[in-house]
Amino acid sequence: MPTPNRDPEHLARLQDYYAENRRIPTQQRIADLIGFSKAAARKLLDRLEIEGFIERTPDGDGWIPSKRFFERAMANDAVRAGAPDMIQGDAGEPFLVDQYLVRDPSRTVMIPIKGDSMIDAGIHDGDVAVIERGRPASKGDFVIAIVDNEFTLKELDIKRGQFILKPHNPAYPVIRPKGKLEIFGVLVGLARRYSH
């Protein structure tokens, strides 16, 4: 009976290690982590390179993750937010969080949210806003605007021919800029972590 391929399990261990240490471990460290010889660790690295998960550093003395290293499994089925439904739990196509949230890396910045003025729009204190700079803003977009030399996240709206910044919490007033309204960027995504 052939030995089962445990490379996905070993890759997961390396991904966990990378998340904690921000580097691919040495062959000796891999051998210690997974519990096999240094030669077996080298063969694992070679297989992961062939599969496109890692690549050699430019100077050839170490390993770095490739784009594929950051793939996450995306379930084939969506889960309902309403009535309960059966879901297959099978992994479908690989999913890259960065690729999903960031379309234009050179113009994208991640900004932590502070405060609760947008809570009724589902934007909470502690969330991370994915902001695309230089994107044209339209009525109804959530934008990072600069008002009185301070940044704020609000919905862009128009009243009586003038742009206003509308909060999504009745405890906060609408902002009516007195001068030119400067838009820093448009909200294109949101990241939230529920457990620490």
Image (cartoon, rainbow, N blue to C red):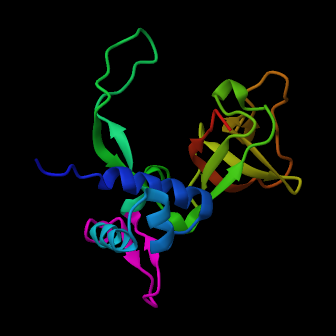
Look at the image and tell me in which quarter the C terminus lies: top right
Q: Residue 38's spot in the image, x, y percent?
A: 40, 73
In this view, which residue lies farthest toward the left? Answer: 1
**Residue occupying image coordinates x 69% and y 52%:** 111
Q: Does the magenta stretch include residue 11?
A: no
Q: In which quarter of the image is residue 86?
A: top left
Number of callouts: 0
Q: Quadrant of residue 161?
A: top right
Horizontal arrangement in the rendering, residue 3 relative to residue 96 (left or right): left
Up/down of 115 relative to 143, above or below: above
Seen from the viewer's position, the closer of residues 196 and 13 is 13
**Residue occupying image coordinates x 30% and y 71%:** 43
In this view, which residue lies farthest toward the bottom? Answer: 59
Q: Quadrant of residue 52?
A: bottom left
What span is in magenta?
A: 48-67
Q: Can residue 133 be seen in this view?
A: no
Q: Residue 100's spot in the image, x, y percent?
A: 43, 50
**Residue occupying image coordinates x 28% and y 33%:** 90
Q: Is residue 52 magenta?
A: yes
Q: Residue 68's spot in the image, x, y percent?
A: 36, 61
Q: Residue 105's spot in the image, x, y percent?
A: 52, 65
Q: Can residue 186 be seen in this view?
A: yes
Horizontal arrangement in the rendering, residue 174 relative to residue 92 (left or right): right
Seen from the viewer's position, the closer of residues 141 and 72 is 72
Seen from the viewer's position, the closer of residues 15 and 84 is 15
Horizontal arrangement in the rendering, residue 149 relative to residue 65 (left or right): right
Seen from the viewer's position, the closer of residues 94 and 147 is 94
In this view, which residue lies farthest toward the right? Answer: 148
